[in-house]
Image: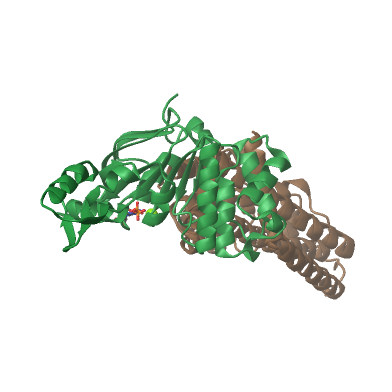
Chain colours: A green, B brown
Amino acid sequence: MPPALATHELCKRYGDRVALDGVDLEVGPGELVGLLGPNGAGKSTLVKIACGLVHPSGGHAEVAGAPAGSPAARAALGYLAELFRFPGWCTADELLGLHQRLAGSPGASAERADLLELVGLSDAAGRRVEQLSKGMQQRLGIAQALVGQPAVVLLDEPTSALDPAGRRAVRGMLEELRRRGVAVLLNSHLLGEIEQVCDRVAIVARGRLVAEGTPGELGRPGGVEIETAAGTRSFSDAGREDVPALVAGLVGKGERIYAVRVVQGTLEDAYLRAIEEAQR
Amino acid sequence: MRGLGTVVGYALRESLRRRVLTVVCLLTAAFLGLYAWGASAVFDEVAPPAGGLIALDTQVLTGATLLGMAMFVTLFLGVVLAVFLTLGAVRGDAERGLLQPLVVRPVGRRTLLAGRFAASAGVCVLYVVAVYAGAVVITGLIGGFWPGSVVLPAFGLAGAVVVVVALTLLGTTLLGTTANGIAVFMLFGAGLTAGLLGQIGDALSSPTLTNVSDIAVWALPFEALYQDALFALTADIEGVTGVLVQLGPLGGADDAGALLWVWAGVYALGAALLGARAFDRADL
Ligand SMILES: Nc1ncnc2c1ncn2[C@@H]1O[C@H](COP(=O)(O)OP(=O)(O)O)[C@@H](O)[C@H]1O
Ligand SMILES: [Mg+2]
């Protein structure tokens, strides 16, 4: 099975501004990958190239094995843009119906009802888009991206207009997508969100991929703290595997030990470190 | 093909729900009402045919002049409709974020453009034909004047609005909503000016002016089609009356022949293809 999304040496220049500078990224089938990076890093550009909205200046991208932008690639993906708008005159249900026809989805009204239920908009099916709050429109946008059961869904900052409860609902929804085997590329600068749901995280800065790995791998151990009678001692270079030796050494010196903590570096630390390195 | 139907349906529903068509129909009804009122007043006032040396048929003169004027208004309303249905279809909608969700669907950019074209052209053709038919019936019933050819002028008007739709569609792949609207109306104005220049050239018997006008009118073939439609309206009127009624507003009647239709077709198709190419290459 080909990867849900793969980019090779992907470059994009707008005039003399470089938005992407040789990015290699892969999202496996059913994998949930978070794309992190500061504003202007090139996250949206990468996703737009994958959707065929933007033409790359170099390199190439494939969606489910088909070249990005080809009809086969477009048929395999669902997309929610960072800045999107739906026609105010159509109802939530009509919007999904339009996208079912455009996507050639045979799902009919059952699919629409299922998707509206998934994003918590069942009660708003008959309401016009212009009567929905921005947060509701964003949830409708997520439902729209899922029309036609795409193999991969590209979500560009899908929670920017959501309140904390809405964000939690989206996390639950992403978990549901994982259960259904849908691959997801999630753009965000909300680290906590990505840390909680993503299988893997890729960090981009200035158009380059600067770090990649599971949230656990990226959040490298941040040292060991041991509480003794004399106070807390920090061993900032030590990791979990060093704990027995450290404890044995201290006990050997006659110290009394009350607690041992392995300090886990957060994704935030890893992110800031990676961004800082990229700026140099 | 199914994709095309979906896009056409979307475009039509959009214009219905946004009440564009409702407003247009109401205003058009008002125009036709006003036209009927004016026509009956004018026909009441013109004297019955005066027998004399010159066979001037005032009824025919009045009828043809009124209908020619109604055709100009029809063209104008049709162009306004064409522009407003189409002006933001690509760049404008992309700037507002409306287009991207549609473009990423498998139907593709070409089908989207073709669907917008078909919907706008279809609505505008139906519209000008209906308004023109209304004006013909009103003039005929009130003043007893029926044009020499009823069908040909309708074709000319329909062709003219289709050309304008194609130009607006090309414009929307290159320009944002406001800039495109201004550009297309300027072109329309240029066409009308070219027609006016031709009339002045005819009146002054200036071949240079007439040539300039002819070239400009063919470069903007909606004007040529409009002049052809005026010609079809008055072609069978003879004698002095015939000469007098050749002077339509903003572009005198002019028989262009079949070549014009070929040219207008090539022109509209070329504009649409250029638009499709620009759309294909655009980053959205
Ligand atoms: N249409 C465009 N024209 C010119 N520059 C652009 C365009 N779109 C994006 N850029 C530039 O490309 C860079 C990456 O932008 P973007 O992909 O939107 O970043 P992100 O989504 O990570 O915030 C930025 O410097 C931005 O200014
Ligand atoms: Mg972005």
Q: Is residue A276 visible?
A: yes
Q: In this view, does A26 lie above or below B170?
A: above
Ligand 1, seen in the image, is in the quarter at: bottom left
Tell me where residue B224 appears, x and y as whole percent: 58, 51
For this view, does B59 lie left or right of residue A212? right
Q: Residue at x 14, y 51 (%)?
A: A250
For this orientation, the residue located farthest to the front is: A254
For this view, does B271 lie left or right of residue A201? right
For this view, does A32 lie left or right of residue B62? left
Report the front residue among B26 and B150: B26
Give the mark count.
Answer: 0
Tell me where residue B121 appears, x and y as whole percent: 64, 48
Report the front residue among A96 and A182: A182
Q: Is residue A47 above or below residue B16?
A: above
For this view, does A80 lie left or right of residue A253? right
Tell me where residue A143 appears, x and y as whole percent: 59, 48
Report the front residue among A269 and B85: A269
Q: Is residue B118 visible?
A: no
Q: Where is residue A127, by image quadrant?
A: bottom right
Q: Is residue B259 above or below residue B132?
A: above
Q: In which quarter of the image is the N terminus of chain B?
A: top right
Q: Where is residue B55, by image quadrant?
A: bottom right
